[in-house]
Amino acid sequence: MTATLTPRDLKRAGQQASVYHLDSREAREAATEAIVTALPAGMVVSVNVIRPELDAANIPNRSRGGLMVIMCSRGHLEPIWTTFRGLDVPVTEPSTGPSAHSAPVRVYIRTAHLPEGS
């Protein structure tokens, strides 16, 4: 029996694969984590908001979506969802990237972290 992958599964797999094609995946993750964790808790954020910092850190455009997913898995960001025609869908906005042609990018909220042991 083969598993049926949804479009969302395929997108996540593609984002994850894009991260692994970097020269230094760990360095890119660390740079992205530093950028995201510097944001105040409760801030609404997307790749558009942190584009100047990602550019300065030389994070390739193709890796940014996957890195945001990693930041979610580490608890730094949480995707914002809404309901449209009875379906839960992610909140998106048009990309401001020069080559993105206004493609949708996900919108997140910066989560607050309690110190370990709290």
Image (cartoon, rainbow, N blue to C red):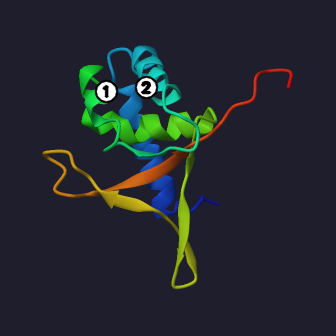
In the image, 85 versus 50, the foreground residue is 50
Q: Secondary structure at mark 1?
A: helix
Quadrant location of the N terminus? bottom right
Q: Which residue shows up at 43% across the image and 39% down it?
A: 66
Across and down, in percent, residue 116 comes to 79, 21
Q: Secondary structure at mark 2?
A: helix
Q: Badge 1: how crowded within 10 Å, few (<14), some, or many (20+)? A: some
Residue 35 is marked as 2
Residue at the disc numbered 1? 53
Q: Which residue shows up at 25% across the image and 57% down it?
A: 103
Q: Is residue 109 left or right of residue 50?
A: right
Q: Are marks 2 and 1 in contact (CB under 8 Å)?
A: yes
Across and down, in percent, residue 93 comes to 34, 59
In the image, 9 versus 33, the foreground residue is 33
Q: Is residue 32 above or below residue 111?
A: above
Q: Which residue shows up at 86% across the image and 21% down it?
A: 117
